[in-house]
Image (cartoon, rainbow, N blue to C red):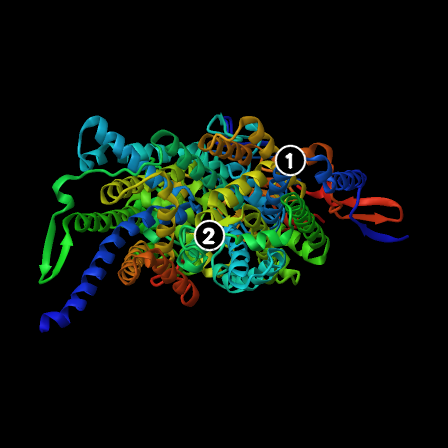
Amino acid sequence: MERGREAPMIDWINVILQGVLVGGLYAMFAAGLSLIFGVMRLVNIAHGDLIVLAAYVALVTTETLGVGPLISLAFVVPLMAVIGYALQRLVLNRTLGDDLLPPLLVTFGLSVIIQNGLLAVFTADSRKLQAGDIEVATIRVFEGVYVGLLPLLQFAVAVAVIAALQFVFYRTALGRAFRATADSQSVAQLMGLDNRHVFALAMALSLAVVAIAGVFLAVRANFDPAIGPARLIFGFEAVIIGGLGSLWGTFAGGLVLGVAQAIGAHINPGWQLLAGHMAFLVILAVRPEGLFPRVRP
Amino acid sequence: MSEPPLLAVRHLDAFYGDFQALFDLSVDVQAGEAVAVVGANGAGKSTLLSSIAGLIRTRRDAVTFDGAAIGGTPAHAIAARGIALVPEGRALFPSLTVEENLLIGGQLKHPGYWNLRRVYELFPTLAERAHVPSTALSGGQQQMAAIGRGLMSNPKLLLCDEISLGLAPIVVRDIYARLPTILAQGTSLMLVEQDVVQALKATQRVYCLQEGRVALAGAAKDLTREAIAAAYFGV
Amino acid sequence: MSVRVAFASRSSHIGMAFCAAALLALTAAPLWGGRDDLQLLSEVYTYVALASLWNLLAGYAGLVSVGQQAYVGLGAYILFAFAILAGLSPLWAIPLAGIIAAIVAMPVAGLVFRLRGHYFAIGTWIIAEVFRLLASQVSVLGGGSGISLPASLVIAIASSRQWRDFIEYWIALALVVAVLALIVLLLRSRYGLALKAIRDSELAAACNGIDVLRTKVLVYIITAAATAMVGAFIFLQRLRISPDAAFSVNDWTAFVIFITVIGGIGRIEGPIVGTIVFFALRQTLADLGTIYLLTLGVVAILVMLMAPKGIWGLIVESFGWQVFPLERSVILGDRRVVSEQKSRG
């Protein structure tokens, strides 16, 4: 009798738990985006496609070297960081300035190029990285409530990544350079900081995070060249829900988005994405500054 | 004055777009001296400092520093050569605390007398507020922090743009009282000022700019108030 | 001595004469063109219209939207909804789609204008996604897999296929002429002056009494309505709709953006030039799918980095031409004293 009444409650706990765990992944999508906007006021429309690119790089790495996804990180992360540095230095630095059109249009063009490049090389077939037994392992939290080990691991990594980014930003010379350059490019130059180099380092860091997110995406679910824009949108929604200027706020935003989607999916599988968008639109309507904005001076 | 000057500006023309702000300007600073550049608003004083610091592009040979032509070099490279600019209006980084502003001034890690501890000795009020956001300081404290930030790179030449601007006279005197220590430790000074009296007291030589040209130049002790007023206002 | 502001110049006189001649020739196309020619021309017209509208939004109002496919799809679905549910003739549904889209655009603007700059762009994309997802939930209009236009309504347009082709062709031509006329009139009006002021400096414009937000929202709504009408027509011609096709980012945004960037942003002739180049490339290269899109992307990036004013921008800078009479000049007596052309940076 009691168990019958408890069952829907257990269901909801499971749903919310799943939402929180996937929210960690969304927070990782968002962190790289947020970093770049904070440092150079650039929104990289190709961000989601770069996550997918990282997933394919991981795929190629695991297949050619015969290693597992976790080991592939050691290769994918530095490679994506180098790509980020080069991309910023060679292409994106030229678009920075007062005019909003060039960076938007160039990153949009980049998005199309990456998607179609991947399509040409890998075709539209769905792929997935195999992580072995860890994919199906679960932990029993309490009666009736189970968490997947892999999602839990991803969540822990997401927390670690955000904490690491916070540390870099607020406790290292590099972070000081990022914040100073964001405040004033010209005065930062007076300190001996080369803006072009600082921006390129920021993009490298962003793509390093993208690489981690990409590998986890690849292990978690099927991926194909076209899913990039949706990841950009999830990351973006997490940033807006959480509030600008705060990495932990972005993290919270990711969790809210994940939970909203999970609830939507539980009611009707076709409503998963819509539920997430609705959460975003509601926040935009009633609290556009986000849930945890950091007031910037 | 037989050795070449530390900083030599020769026939400098400076433009903001189509507007010409400086015309065939020549000034110099010897190693170890403090030079003042005075003039009314719009005379071109800040433009001169921005040109030297590399924020405005100039002809290669228009600015020579430590024997090398640095005109047209990007600002971060000029900072690396040992010129530090304390910008007009302080321009501390709002996202950084006081101490972080000082630390980023020391980004270049040039060896020398100045480090965090010594800057705090020079300006004790900053030590008390080390972890406060730079925006929470008073005008005078911000000016001290901006100067301290400039010193952290152990520059050979410190350019100060209107450090007395917007500050009470007693605060200005307090700050100017520190300048001899800075000079004594080997940093030469170029002070741009509207407060002519303070500038004359603190420096050995004075240039007076008027509408982008040098209207008067000479030793501080030799110039009379009247001569300076005449050059300042162009009467 | 009289002082007046004139829009025309010698090159625009020539340009307008050329356009009038071209319009005559194109209206008579059913006489000299085959079915394929008319189809191709219709496609060209719809892309000129969509690109010109995107250009109005981005190049003139400074609102970069990557979500105009929201209104293409909305207009198309309105037409199909009225056709299937109310039996309304598709011809009436086109202007109706415009009106309804304008109404829908108002609350959307209320939401999306809370975001600025880059964030605004992504916000428009999300709106398009929401529309797409909502459309897939409406099973009476085919849900996720889509639906076809009822044959009876199609036949009601005209009894023979040939006349249907002619009528649809003339609708396309009328739409693109109307869109271009709308844009020219808007730019010549005081709203146009306001837009140029906003584009140069929002702060200065606001200080001069221009209600920046209201002007931008107005342009957004007008663009939404016109885009919806073009979208309605496109899918009328296709006879079949599905959410993925109606709200396709590639077809209605990527191509449109690339056309406008390559042709020249911020000038009315730009999208026209860009569309011609786009179709010339497509006809000669033959549709290579992904490689084609990839190449377009690369070319657009190169243009943006090296010649940000596009092909027409380069022409204007070299020769000072304009086809449409839009550049304001001050005429004192009989002398042209100041020309917007020369003073533009």
Dots 1 and 2: beta carbons under 8 Å?
no
Which quarter of the picture shows residue A294? Answer: bottom left
Looking at the rendered structure, the secondary structure element under dot 1 is helix
Could you say which is closer to the camera, residue B37 or residue C125?
C125
Q: Residue at x 32, y 47 (%)?
A: A29
How far apart marks 1 and 2 lie (CA) works out to 27 Å
Q: Residues within 10 Å of mark 2 (few under 14, many from 20)?
A: some
Residue furthest to the right in view is C1
Is residue B195 in view from this perspective?
no
The kind of residue on which mark 1 rests is Asp
- Residue labelled with disc 1: C37
* Residue B77 location, quadrant: top left
Q: Is residue B225 left or right of residue A19?
A: right
How many tags in the picture? Answer: 2
Q: Chain of mark 1?
A: C
Q: Could you say which is closer to the camera, residue C162 or residue A74? A: C162
Q: Residues within 10 Å of mark 1 (few under 14, many from 20)?
A: few
Identify the image quadrant of the N terminus of chain A.
Answer: bottom left
Query: x, y (%) of residue B158?
Result: 45, 41
Query: Which numbered disc flags the more N-terminal residue, 1 or 2?
Result: 1
x then y, percent, for residue C289: 46, 33
Of A277 and B131, nearer the camera is A277
Q: Amino acid at mark 2?
A: Ile
Quarter of the view holding residue B135: bottom left
Q: Are marks 1 and 2 on the same chain?
A: yes
Asked if residue A118 can be seen in this view, the reply is yes
Task: Where is residue C194? Give x, y as percent.
Answer: 66, 56
Is residue C66 positioned above or below C203 on the image?
above
Residue C147: image tag: 2
Task: Tell me if residue B144 comes above or below residue C47 in the rendering.
Answer: below
